[in-house]
Image (cartoon, rainbow, N blue to C red):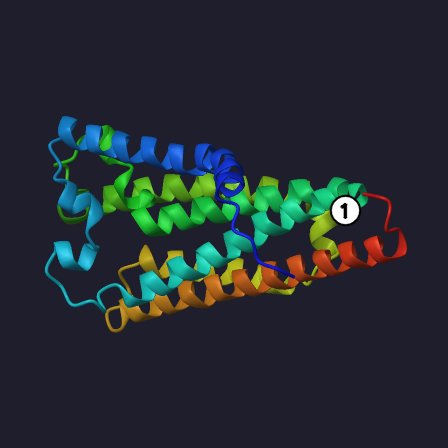
C-alpha cells in the first residue's frame, strides 16, 4: 500500500475535532485569565505546579497526587465503557446510566480530593480570610460533616437506584472502598489519634481509591466482554 499525504483532507477531518475540543479549551483559558484579573490572582499561581508555587520539594503531596491519578483512571474507565455500550442497544439500556452515574460520582470525588472542596466550601459563607481550620476547628468539623451528609445521601441514592446492576458485579470491592473511605473520614474528624494521624488517614483513603479503581476496572471489563460476546453472536444488531 502506497502512503499518500492528503493534507487538505486531513485538515478537513481535523476541523470538527478542533471545534469540539480545542475551542472549549481556549474559552476555558480565557475565562481563567479573566477571573484572575477580577480576583487579583496571579496566573503563575493558577498555572504552575503547586509544589513549585509554595517552594516545596516535588514529592510534596505524594499520596494525594497518586490518589488523583487513580481517581482519574477510574473516571476514564467508566466514561469510556459507557460510550462503548452505545454499540449495542441491549448493553446500552442495561449499563449506560449506571456507568454515566459512576463517572459523575467518581469525577466529583476526584474534584473534591483535588481542590479539597469539603474544606474550602465554607469560604462561600465566611469569606476567603476566615481561616476556619486554625481559628475554629469544631466549626470546621461541623461544616465538613454537613458536606459529607450530602455525600452519603447521594451515595445512598446511587446504590439504591442501581442496586440491580451492582448485584451483578463483584461489589465486595465497592463495599470495601466505602468502608475504607468511612474510616479515613472518621480518622480525619477525630483528635484522639495523636501518633501517625496523617499516615493512617491517608492510607485508608489510598486503599479506598485503589479498591474503587479495582471495582470499576473489573466491572467495566466484564461489560465490555459481554458487549463483545453479544456482537459475536449477533453481529448485525447494533
Who is closer to the viewer here, 201 or 9?
A: 9
Dividing the picture into quadrants, the one containing residue 197 is: bottom left
Return the x and y of residue 137 as percentages of the image width and height. Answer: 21, 48
Return the x and y of residue 143 as percentages of the image width and height. Answer: 31, 40
Q: Which residue is mark 1?
A: 91
Return the x and y of residue 80 as percentages of the image width and height. Answer: 59, 50
In this rendering, position of residue 126 left or right of residue 111: left
Q: For the residue carrying disc 1, how many other residues have a C-alpha within 10 Å: few (<14), some (14-19), or many (20+)?
A: some
Who is closer to the viewer here, 136 or 102?
A: 102
Dividing the picture into quadrants, the one containing residue 54 is: bottom left
Dividing the picture into quadrants, the one containing residue 39 is: top left
In this rendering, position of residue 58 left or right of residue 217: left
Residue at 64 percent across and 46 percent down: it is 82
Above or below: residue 232 compared with residue 95 = below
Q: Is residue 233 visible?
A: yes
Above or below: residue 9 compared with residue 63 = above
Instruction: Count all numbered tags in the image, as a single digit.
Output: 1
Return the x and y of residue 238 as percentages of the image width and height. Answer: 81, 43
Above or below: residue 225 compared with residue 114 = below
* Kind of element beneath mark 1: helix
Q: Which quarter of the rendering shows the N terminus?
A: bottom right
Who is closer to the viewer here, 135 or 74?
A: 74
Farthest residue, direction bottom = 195
Q: Is residue 184 visible?
A: no
Above or below: residue 2 compared with residue 19 = below
Residue at 39 percent across and 32 percent down: it is 23
In this rendering, position of residue 126 left or right of residue 12: left
Residue at 35 percent across and 61 percent down: it is 187
Residue at 41 percent across and 60 percent down: it is 69
Amino acid at each position: 500500500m502506497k502512503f499518500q499525504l492528503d493534507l487538505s483532507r486531513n485538515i478537513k477531518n481535523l476541523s470538527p475535532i478542533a471545534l469540539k475540543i480545542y475551542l472549549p479549551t481556549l474559552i476555558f483559558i480565557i475565562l481563567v485569565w479573566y477571573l484572575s484579573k477580577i480576583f487579583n490572582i496571579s496566573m503563575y499561581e493558577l498555572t504552575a505546579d503547586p509544589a513549585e508555587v509554595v517552594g516545596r520539594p516535588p514529592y510534596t503531596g505524594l499520596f494525594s497526587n497518586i490518589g488523583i491519578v487513580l481517581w482519574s483512571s477510574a473516571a476514564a474507565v467508566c466514561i469510556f465503557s459507557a460510550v462503548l455500550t452505545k454499540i449495542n442497544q441491549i448493553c446500552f439500556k442495561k449499563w449506560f446510566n449506571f456507568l454515566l452515574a459512576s463517572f459523575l460520582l467518581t469525577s466529583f470525588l476526584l474534584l473534591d480530593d483535588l481542590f479539597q472542596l469539603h474544606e474550602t466550601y465554607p469560604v462561600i459563607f465566611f469569606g476567603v480570610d476566615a481561616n476556619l481550620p486554625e481559628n475554629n476547628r469544631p466549626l470546621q468539623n461541623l461544616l465538613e460533616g454537613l458536606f459529607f451528609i450530602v455525600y452519603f445521601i447521594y451515595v445512598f441514592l446511587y446504590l439504591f437506584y442501581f442496586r440491580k446492576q451492582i448485584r451483578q458485579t463483584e461489589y465486595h470491592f465497592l463495599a470495601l472502598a466505602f468502608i475504607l473511605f468511612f474510616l479515613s473520614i472518621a480518622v480525619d474528624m477525630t483528635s484522639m489519634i495523636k501518633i501517625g494521624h496523617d499516615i493512617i488517614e491517608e492510607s485508608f483513603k489510598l486503599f479506598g481509591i485503589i479498591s474503587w479503581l479495582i471495582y470499576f476496572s473489573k466491572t467495566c471489563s466484564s461489560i465490555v466482554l459481554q458487549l463483545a460476546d453479544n456482537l459475536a453472536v449477533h453481529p448485525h444488531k447494533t
